[in-house]
Amino acid sequence: MRRPGEGGGWQRGFTLVELIMVIVIMGIIGAMVAVFMRSPIDAYVASASRAALTDVADTTLRRLARDLRKALPNSVRTSANGQCIEFIPTKTGGRYRSADRNAGDGSALDFSVADTAFNVLGSNGALPADQRIAVGDVVVVYNLGIAGASAYAGDNTATVTAVGAETAAPVETPISIAAKQFPLPSASNRFHVVPAGEKVVAYVCSGGSLRRTVTNNGFISACPTGGPIVARNAACTFDYGGVDLQRNALVRVVLQLTENGETVSLQHEVHVNNTP
């Protein structure tokens, strides 16, 4: 629109109708652009959310697998509803002396009486700090997970009371334990060591969260629901496969995480060596 201005000149301008028409047209164009851009943006957000959930689920399963690989042979078991898996963790292992180093010196582990000491073949001090046998740890010999040979029942466990000075070559480490007559010797003279601070570890799905619980006051087995949260908005299933003739077993874990309307489900299998 043109109208006379000051000094007889002409000025350019817009009427209110023209402005409204421009606003309406721009709104229509903006709405059309938004329609075309919404799908790619939603897809990006959904993809980022799924990637984050996958990362959390993968990290959780890897942590669980790492724990399971350190489980005491024949100690892994699941609850009836498949919502809990528990096991006895180990920090190290070794071989005990089966015959006295010198006749009558008591350096061998005697299975005919309640023994209180034996020699470990090798140097305990040469192990990494977190793997060394220490006072308060629990020695387990030939755990079969059955009546009479179950660590959960304390059939084949003894608490370490002292760690002696290592002998000269061949290097051996004297270990003192609470008096215990172990029911069965190991065919390969092996033993396992359970850390004092972690007697039983359980992963429990409850209330929409996956928790890792630790029991350190004995081999109590009840799949407790407390403990720190490992993953939120989680649903899981634990399945423990039977043992075959080679003393192998398989743990199958299905973990499902949900957040912001997105759900990710991962399945992981962990081989468990049950040779005692």
Image (cartoon, rainbow, N blue to C red):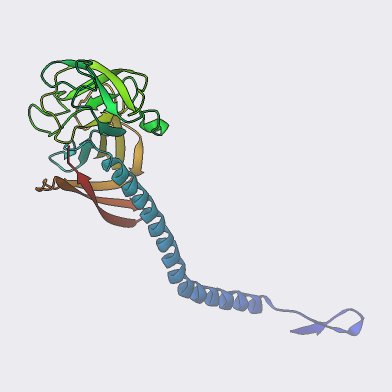
Q: Quadrant of residue 153?
A: top left
Q: Quadrant of the C terminus?
A: top left
Q: Quadrant of residue 186?
A: top left
Horizontal and vertical percent position of residue 101: 24, 23
Residue ID at (12%, 16%): 113
Most foreground residue, 19 or 159 = 159
Horizontal and vertical percent position of residue 259: 36, 52
Residue ID at (23%, 28%): 96
Residue ID at (8%, 26%): 148
Most foreground residue, 28 or 101 = 101
Q: Is residue 35 left or right of residue 259?
A: right
* Residue closest to the far right: 7
Q: Is residue 178 above or below residue 261?
A: above
Q: Quadrant of residue 133?
A: top left
Q: Is residue 95 left or right of residue 154?
A: right
Q: Is residue 201 above or below residue 1?
A: above
Horizontal and vertical percent position of residue 43: 41, 67
* Residue closest to the far left: 147
Residue 225 in view (yes/no): no
Q: Quadrant of the N terminus?
A: bottom right
Residue 68 in view (yes/no): yes
Most foreground residue, 176 or 206 = 176
Residue ID at (18%, 27%): 98
Q: Is residue 46 above or below residue 244?
A: below
Give the number of callouts. Answer: 0
Horizontal and vertical percent position of residue 164: 34, 18
